[in-house]
Amino acid sequence: MLKYFFISLFFIFNFLYANDVGYSFHVSNEDPYEKEGILLDVNLTQLDKSKVMLFNFSLKKSADYTFHQVGFTENEKYHDLRQEYFYLIYPKKSGKIAIAFEMTKSITNDDKVAYGISGDRDNVKGLEKEDIVVDLKPLVLEVKSLPLNIDLVGDFTLKHTLDKKITQAYDPINLSVELKGKGFLESFELLKKDENYRLFSQNPKLKLLHSKMGSMASLKWDYAISAKENFVLPKVSLKAFNPKTQKSYELGFPAYKVAVKQVESATLLDKEDYPARAKGIEWAFWANFLSYVIVFVAGFLMPRDLFKQKRKKAQSDEDILKEMIKEAKTHKALLQVLLLENKAEFLDAIEALEGVVYNAKKTSLSAIKEMIL
């Protein structure tokens, strides 16, 4: 299926739990180099056809290796379950390492499956099953060590672009670098800070695409470098190793001398004041400021004075009415005063006065005045 799949073949087959499940492992290379990608093919097969079975399988996480699932197929027929998993594995250290697995098989029957799917989409019923943890022996690999001082493992190329080698003081130059190829790649910094220039950068942009053929990877750096004097951008050298050819090679770019032109300080200074300096006392400003203060004070005090005047007027009108009531000498004179006011609080007094004036009732004038004073 794959050219490198049969370079080296490691095969295990074993029966589990009264021959009800079979499993096998196929690995593309039993003794890879550190950080060399290998393909693991795992097959799980139901052997006991009298049961309905489900499998849950995965590799265990470990500091000794990284892995990526790159394929999965399944035969979902009841009583004949088969699953195939594909993993891309990268050993992270040399020597013996054990690829560990975790697996659970679930056992049920046709009646329980029928009951679990009998509900409609709004009333899904849980599947009753028995979960059994399966202990699988780890897959042991003999991992070969890399040559000394290797930075990259795989088949990579490096491209870089420097926009200019001559610049003005503090005007940055731009450096773009891209590492691209097939193999194991993680993010790392390419340039280090230096006291001779200022280095501006973002996090490197890492892209990975894992498949059965391996990992296609790219890592891109974008830098801006500025300085006030001439400086040297240091040489970049990365040592790489290709496990397929078993050869080392070098990637990078040479050191660059960057010339920085000085800018005369006189050209950086403004010869005019913005805004212009004030000459003497700015009377117009203070006149405007005083007018705002007057308007504010007048607006603050005027409503209060109007309220006081209105309250004073209300008090004087009330005093006048009381005086007129006290001075009324006859029932008829008092009736005229109250009718002119036309207030609801005087209705009882008006009714009493009308009874005296028009119906010859006998109610003293002082008694009626007590009703309203």
Image (cartoon, grey):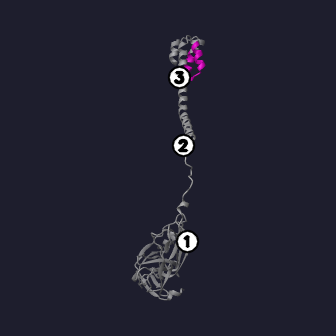
Q: What's drawn in magenta, residue-wise?
A: 333-352
Which element type, helix, strand or loop, lies under badge 2? loop
Which numbered disc, 2 or 3, marks the residue that appears first in the sequence?
2
Which element type, helix, strand or loop, lies under badge 3? helix
Tell me if I can see residue 212 in this picture. no
Residue position marked by numbered label 2 in the rendering: 280
Q: Nearer the viewer, mark 3 or mark 1?
A: 1
Point out residue 256 in the picture as x, y percentages from the top left corner.
51, 76
Residue 139: quarter of image? bottom left
Residue 338 colored in magenta in the image: yes
Q: Amino acid at mark 1?
A: Ile
Which numbered disc, 2 or 1, marks the residue that appears first in the sequence?
1
Q: Residue 49: give its label.
A: none
Q: Amino acid at mark 2?
A: Gly
Depicted 119 relative to depicted 359: above or below? below
Q: Which is more toward the observer, 7 or 261?
A: 261
Which element type, helix, strand or loop, lies under badge 1? strand
Q: Amino acid at mark 3?
A: Gln
Packing grade of label 3 (10 A; few <14, some 14-19, many >=20) is few
Residue found at x 57% / y 22%:
343
Do residues under tags 2 and 1 come within 8 Å of each other at their CB atoms? Answer: no
The CA distance from mark 2 to mark 3 is 55 Å
Q: Nearer the viewer, mark 2 or mark 3?
A: 2
Q: Residue 166: give its label.
A: 1
